Image (spheres, rainbow, N blue to C red):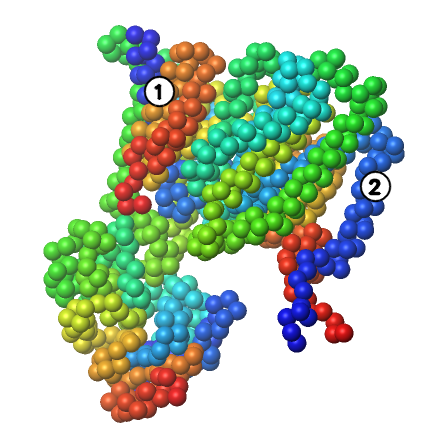
């Protein structure tokens, strides 16, 4: 029963990892950008949630109404102000600039909020649970998983059924020709980053409700998201959810064997899958 | 002669250190179809890329509807009503046939062209509207590329080598559609390797050679010998 | 004029002057234990080890296009190898540093085989995952103190040399030797056929492949060499510190962030860049370190600014104004004077 429980809890945790990963996957799909600061932006969102919650005295979930648009604005500004200048054929500039951003964000948060761990209090939501077949399911992990599924379904729908999604796919296919259709690449990329950070905003607030957080934990969140993306297969959003779940289950099983092995088990699962399925579980057929 | 819709004066174009166009002059009148001919490397595609904004130029070198546009981005130029059917078709592989057409019209310019009008012009596209654009034959892809440009309801349509790599019967289908397209008052610039086609489709013709205009004149008045000299530079 | 009137040279006038200046600087550095105080000597040793790390990362990222953000894996591995080999293998510390380098190279092979499956930026994060695996694994080794780490036992420290001054001097000379070795290896690789292949790959991977360059093997070779030397550098870093823990040994900030900033600021893809970068970095650190986190923010902004405004770094700005090369790599055809 312990093992089944570990698998179920790991699956639910995978929803959070999928939220970490979805934003990463989105911007890679649209502009081939890998954002090294992604994890630190998740942590930034958690701190924004904390600040909003304590300043206005509202429930952490209500803070989403402010955090998500704020993160989207930050994303748009970041892309138009800095990141668009780094995009070209060369791999190094975007990588090194986002790496620099990561260091700036981490130390900026340290400066403002100190290294003390913080946590958002969601009251009853954190402790409430339902008993299903002998396994106690927390309402919070359930809600997180449901929201991850909803976010990914929403992104998938946006990608394939809206004008914005069409613009994303066209720009991803061929930037110059998309420009001929009247799509301003700089703006399209700005919107992609805005959307990516909006999702990051949701991920950050849930992270802050689920665990205590501090400025140094961004790197690990980036890695979890990255692992979920690669396990699932690049450019496949539902695959990303599956990747998050695989990662969550591997960590839960590792923790079940020995608490010190939780993270290690996740990384090893990733490396094993990289060795046997380098294109991920669900590679995109159209490349 | 009415004011030209497009007036190019002293246009230079560069790729890095390489200069592709040298002080090019050219005009297109409203409703006029002109043809651009010339050997490979003469600068025909560079000219198309410059007009459409894929290559940035000096602002005043290209004037469109009386305003300088040489410095504008491709999307800004598209919004003013210039559409390009690029060489090699260049459809969006991740988009279906219909999505390729819709995205061509996403600027929302008014005019005669709509999905229905494109489907009336090329009925095969309606049949295949939902398939990925990569699943089409070369000729059908060219129809989508032309339809995608028309969806923008442009005032000036640029066609770059639309017959390249297509079977003669397909080329005929596509060129048969052209008079109907431009009869609505649209201007067009046509880059074409087939000199006979270029002359029969256009009112005036420019011949480029090594980045310069080597000959220009009315399509029905130029002799084959003149064109041969201008084309090959002998 | 016949072909015999031309010759191909790699050196230049400036490089001969630089060589003369370099010899003077080198002599000063070799003699440092006799003129520098203990604190300055330690700082100098650290500067030299950072120069080694930066040169190696530059070879990896700036020439081979392998942008790693996980070189702390090899720094930490080297450090832990030093501790393990001296504490349990009974090796002399200097020998242990050499063996640590060999271990680094050996470990780099399977690591490369695995993470070379990731392309571009994903390769970068893959190297980070590797470093995390190493860090978490090190925390599981209870013999070396687990998560809280351990100190180098006194007998091991004393076996290095008699007396504290002698130990400090030896440890410094080892750092100097390491920096020179790293520079020599980087320079040697770049001047070799492999170096030409690397440049070809960096400029155009497809064209390089069509010329019959085995890209995978060339990159693999570079990765393994860099892994070995980075591990040896790591062993020396922790021989200076005398204490190791997973968080310190596998610190992404200390062994990757700073190193990347050094190379970017100095000029990525040039042999001279890391030298300039390491000088600028330590000048900044010694003057601004009191600012703590603010210092890191300034450093990050500085690096971003350089990347956006002068992507070839400070050395690139010098090069843009003059044709100086201290380490001549380009081959020039020069006409011989007529007899």
Query: Where residue C114 is drawn, which disc sits there?
Result: none
Q: Split into 4 quadrants, where in the image is the N terminus of chain A?
A: top left
Tell me which corner region of the image, top left, top right, bottom left or bottom right, holds residue C50: top right
In the rendered structure, the answer to whether residue C56 lies left or right of residue B114 reads: right
Q: Split into 4 quadrants, where in the image is the C terminus of chain A?
A: top left
Query: Where residue A249 is drawn, which disc sits there?
Result: 1
Residue pictured at 56% horizontal, 41% vertical: C222
Q: Are marks 2 and 1 in contact (CB under 8 Å)?
A: no
Q: Looking at the picture, how far across and down is residue A168, in whole percent? A: 33, 48
Q: Is residue B68 above or below residue B224?
A: above
Question: What residue sits right under mark 2 in the picture?
Answer: C27
Q: Is residue C99 above or below residue B122?
A: above
In the rendered structure, the answer to whether residue C23 lies left or right of residue C290 reads: right
- Crowding around mark 1 (Cα neighbors within 10 Å: few <14, some 14 to 19, many 20+) is many
Q: Looking at the picture, how far across and down is residue B181, in whole percent? A: 19, 72
Q: Is residue A250 above or below residue A227?
A: above
Is there one chain holding both mark 2 and mark 1? no
Residue pictured at 36% horizontal, 74% vertical: B40
Work out whether residue B116 can be spotted: no
| Chain on which label 1 sits | A
Under tag 1, what secondary structure? Answer: helix
């Amino acid at each position: 029963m312990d093992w089944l429980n570990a698998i179920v809890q790991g699956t639910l945790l995978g929803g959070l990892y999928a939220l970490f990963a979805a934003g990463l996957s989105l911007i890679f799909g649209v502009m081939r950008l890998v954002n090294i600061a992604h994890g630190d932006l998740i942590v930034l969102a958690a701190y924004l949630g904390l600040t909003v919650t304590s300043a206005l005295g509202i429930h952490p979930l209500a803070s989403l109404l402010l955090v998500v648009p704020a993160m989207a604005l930050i994303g748009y500004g970041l892309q138009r102000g800095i990141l668009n200048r780094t995009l070209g054929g060369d791999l190094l500039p975007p990588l090194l600039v986002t790496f620099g951003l990561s260091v700036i964000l981490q130390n900026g948060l340290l400066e403002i909020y100190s290294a003390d761990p913080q946590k958002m209090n969601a009251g009853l939501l954190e402790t409430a649970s339902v008993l299903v077949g002998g396994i106690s399911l927390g309402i919070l992990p359930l809600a997180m998983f449901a929201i991850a599924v909803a976010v990914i379904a929403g992104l998938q729908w946006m990608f394939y059924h809206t004008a914005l999604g069409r613009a994303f796919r066209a720009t991803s296919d061929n930037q110059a020709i998309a420009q001929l259709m009247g799509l301003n690449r700089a703006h399209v990329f700005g919107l992609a980053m805005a959307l990516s950070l909006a999702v990051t905003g949701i991920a950050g607030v849930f992270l802050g409700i689920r665990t205590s957080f501090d400025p140094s934990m961004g790197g690990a969140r980036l890695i979890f998201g990255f692992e979920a993306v690669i396990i699932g297969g690049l450019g496949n959003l539902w695959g990303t959810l599956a990747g998050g779940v695989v990662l969550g289950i591997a960590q839960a099983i590792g923790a079940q064997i020995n608490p010190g092995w939780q993270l290690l088990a996740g990384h090893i699962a990733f490396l094993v899958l990289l060795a046997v399925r380098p294109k991920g579980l669900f590679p995109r057929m159209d490349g | 002669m009415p004011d030209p819709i497009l007036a190019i004066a002293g246009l230079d174009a560069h790729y890095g250190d390489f200069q592709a166009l040298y002080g090019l002059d050219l005009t297109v009148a409203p409703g006029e179809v002109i043809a651009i001919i010339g050997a490979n490397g003469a600068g025909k595609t560079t000219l198309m890329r410059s007009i459409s904004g894929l290559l940035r130029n000096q602002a005043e070198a290209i004037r469109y509807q009386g305003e300088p546009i040489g410095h504008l981005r491709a999307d800004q130029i598209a919004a003013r009503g210039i559409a390009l059917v690029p060489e090699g078709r260049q459809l969006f592989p991740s988009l279906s046939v219909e999505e390729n057409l819709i995205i061509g019209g996403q600027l929302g310019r008014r005019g005669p062209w709509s999905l229905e009008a494109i489907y009336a012009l090329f009925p095969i596209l309606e049949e295949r509207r939902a398939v990925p654009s990569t699943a089409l034959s070369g000729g059908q892809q060219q129809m989508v590329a032309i339809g995608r440009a028309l969806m923008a309801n442009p005032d000036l349509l640029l066609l770059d080598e639309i017959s390249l790599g297509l079977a003669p019967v397909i080329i005929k289908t596509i060129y048969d559609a052209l008079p109907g397209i431009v009869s609505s008052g649209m201007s067009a610039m046509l880059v074409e390797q087939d000199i006979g086609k270029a002359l029969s489709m256009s009112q005036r013709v420019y011949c480029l050679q090594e980045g310069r205009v080597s000959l220009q004149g009315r399509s029905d008045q130029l002799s084959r010998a003149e064109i041969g000299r201008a084309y090959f530079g002998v | 004029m016949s072909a015999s009137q031309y010759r191909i040279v790699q050196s230049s006038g400036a490089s001969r002057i630089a060589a003369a200046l370099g010899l003077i600087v080198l002599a000063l550095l070799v003699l440092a234990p006799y003129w520098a105080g203990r604190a300055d000597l330690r700082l100098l040793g650290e500067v030299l080890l950072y120069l080694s790390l930066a040169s190696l990362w530059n070879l990896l990222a700036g020439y081979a296009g392998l942008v790693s953000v996980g070189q702390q894996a090899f720094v930490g591995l080297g450090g832990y190898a030093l501790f393990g080999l001296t504490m349990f293998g009974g090796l002399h510390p200097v020998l242990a540093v050499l063996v640590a380098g060999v271990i680094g190279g050996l470990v780099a092979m399977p690591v490369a085989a695995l993470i070379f499956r990731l392309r571009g930026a994903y390769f970068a994060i893959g190297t980070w995952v590797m470093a995390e695996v190493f860090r978490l694994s090190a925390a599981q080794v209870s013999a070396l103190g687990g998560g809280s780490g351990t100190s180098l036992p006194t007998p091991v420290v004393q076996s290095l040399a008699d007396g504290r001054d002698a130990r400090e001097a030896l440890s410094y000379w080892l750092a100097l030797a390491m920096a020179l070795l790293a520079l020599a290896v980087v320079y040697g690789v770049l001047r070799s056929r492999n170096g030409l292949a690397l440049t070809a790959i960096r400029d155009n991977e497809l064209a390089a492949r069509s010329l019959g360059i085995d890209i995978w093997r060339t990159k693999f070779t570079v990765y393994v060499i860099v892994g070995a030397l980075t591990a040896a550098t790591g062993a020396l870093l922790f021989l200076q510190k005398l204490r190791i823990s997973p968080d310190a040994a596998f610190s992404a900030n200390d062994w990757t962030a700073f190193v990347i900033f050094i190379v970017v600021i100095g000029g990525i893809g040039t042999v001279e860049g890391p030298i300039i970068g390491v000088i600028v970095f330590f000048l900044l650190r010694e003057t601004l370190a009191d600012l703590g986190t603010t210092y890191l923010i300034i450093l990050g902004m500085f690096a971003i600014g350089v990347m956006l405004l002068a992507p070839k770094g400070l050395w690139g700005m010098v090069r843009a104004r003059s044709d100086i090369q201290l380490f001549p790599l380009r081959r020039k055809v020069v006409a011989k004077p007529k007899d």
